[in-house]
Image: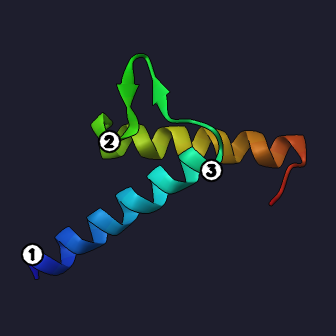
């Protein structure tokens, strides 16, 4: 079960990282995405998605 959970977390981290890169975010405050915590990735992704919806830039 632990392996499944770890794999799910890794997949989510990869998804969030890919989406942020696709949005043009590679680094923030001198920290590369791979250095971010899961919480930081999720927060930034939510921010990007919220702004994308508000601006009408649905992809």
Label 1 – label 3 distance at C-alpha: 30 Å
- Point out the tag, 3 or 2, that comes first from the N-terminus: 3
| Spot occupied by residue 14 in the image (x, y as percentages of width and height) | 39, 60
Of the pair 14 and 37, the residue shown nearer to us? 14
- Point out the tag, 1 or 3, that comes first from the N-terminus: 1
| Spot occupied by residue 47 in the image (x, y as percentages of width and height) | 62, 38
Residue at (63% x, 38% y) in the render:
24
Label 1, on which residue? 2
Label 2, on which residue? 34
Q: Secondary structure at mark 3?
A: helix
Quadrant where the N terminus is found in the figure: bottom left
- Point out the tag, 2 or 1, that comes first from the N-terminus: 1
Label 3, on which residue? 22
Label 3 – label 2 distance at C-alpha: 15 Å
Quadrant where the C terminus is found in the figure: bottom right
| Spot occupied by residue 58 in the image (x, y as percentages of width and height) | 83, 57
């Amino acid at each position: 079960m632990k392996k499944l959970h770890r794999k799910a977390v890794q997949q989510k981290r990869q998804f969030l990282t890919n989406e942020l890169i696709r949005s043009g975010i590679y680094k923030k405050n001198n920290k590369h995405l791979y250095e971010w915590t899961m919480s930081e990735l999720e927060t930034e992704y939510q921010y990007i998605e919220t702004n994308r919806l508000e601006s009408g830039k649905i992809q």
